Amino acid sequence: MPLVAVSVGSNLDREHNIDRALESLRSSFGQLRISRVYETPAVGFSGPDFYNLVVAFETGLDVRPLIDRLHGIEAEQGRTRTPQETTSRVIDLDLLLYGDGILYSEGLDIPRREILEYDFVLQPLAELLPDTVHPLSGDRLEQLLDQAAWSLGPAQWQPLNGS
């Protein structure tokens, strides 16, 4: 079973919505490894700050059914996906890694390009899975973070029933 990593973010009723998402992820996938929570400004639009974290778990699901389940969890929490979504979000669940898979066909983005673009994705991912090798760069996630020009401080809030 592949180890997968999923980013979790919210900037609306952040604590509540992240706790609900973690409960749903546990119900669907079992035991989760959970990073610390990071608070970051909205990117690409004006809105409240986000709480961002990463969870990792093993799954027997193929990639498409896994993404469908993540979108289902978002929908259960009231998220409606729109094509050019640069707005506040009740919950945002993005598949970052699917084992060591490189899947860019048919609308897939794995490993997710944002890993190398945004601090709020790489920092909690590297914290959680420091020795995991990025499938494209060949670098350990901890090395990628060390090479980055930024470092976030964790938010003061932690999800209920932490890691």
Image (spheres, rainbow, N blue to C red):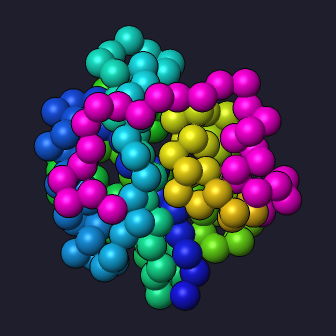
| Placement of the N terminus among the 4 image quadrants | bottom right
Tell which of 100 and 132 is nearer to you: 132
Residue 82 appears anywhere in the view:
no
Q: Quadrant of residue 30?
A: bottom left
Tell which of 128 and 90 is nearer to you: 128
Residue 91: x and y, percent? 29, 44
Q: Quadrant of residue 57?
A: bottom left
Q: Which residues are magenta?
A: 135-163
Q: Residue furthest top?
A: 46
Q: Quadrant of residue 65?
A: bottom left
Residue 151: x and y, percent? 60, 28
Residue 57 position (above or below residue 138): below
Please state the total of marks drawn on the protein image: 0
Q: Is residue 31 left or right of residue 15?
A: right
Residue 79 position (above or below residue 75): above
Residue 97 position (above or below residue 11): below
| Placement of the C terminus among the 4 image quadrants | bottom left
Q: Is residue 145 left or right of residue 63?
A: right
Residue ID at (42%, 19%): 41
Residue 134: x and y, percent? 75, 58
Residue ID at (69%, 64%): 132
Residue 17 appears anywhere in the view:
yes
Residue ID at (70%, 50%): 142
**123 in the magenta segment:** no
Residue ID at (22%, 75%): 27
Residue 62: x and y, percent? 52, 81
